[in-house]
Amino acid sequence: MSVVIPFPKRTAEPAVECEIDLFSAVDLAIRDLREISEIANEVGRARARECLAMLENAYAEALQA
């Protein structure tokens, strides 16, 4: 009869705290989407432009609030 030796269970590493505020995250996403819209294929460019427009509008409205 064989003996099964279980591997120790892996513990999930704690999530790294995000040190960025929402406005900075949106600003960075806008920059990334601009870059993606320049290098992606046509479908990717169209989707990146749509997301970019949505984020730019939301960002501008949040700054006015």
Image: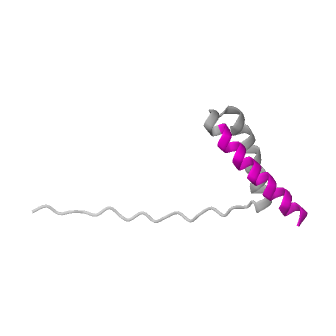
Quadrant occupied by the N terminus: bottom left
Q: Is residue 16 above or below residue 51?
A: below
Q: In the drawing, does residue 4 fall left or right of residue 29?
A: left
Q: In the drawing, does residue 4 fall left or right of residue 12?
A: left
Q: Nearer the viewer, residue 55 or 6?
A: 55
Q: Residue at x 46, y 65 (%)?
A: 11
Residue 26 magenta: no
Q: Is residue 15 above or below residue 27?
A: below
What's the image's color scheme?
one colour
Quadrant occupied by the C terminus: bottom right
Q: Main secondary structure of the magenta part?
A: helix
Q: Residue at x 77, y 44 (%)?
A: 31
Q: Residue 17 appears in which quarter of the rendering?
A: bottom right
The x and y percentages for residue 54 are 74, 53
Judged from this view, the residue extending furthest toward the right is 64
Residue 47 magenta: yes
Kindly tell me whether residue 21 is visible in this rendering. no
Q: Residue at x 32, y 61 (%)?
A: 7
Q: Is residue 28 above or below residue 9?
A: above
Q: Nearer the viewer, residue 4 or 20?
A: 20
The x and y percentages for residue 21 are 77, 62
The x and y percentages for residue 57 are 80, 55
Q: Which residues are magenta?
A: 45-65
Q: Residue at x 17, y 63 (%)?
A: 3
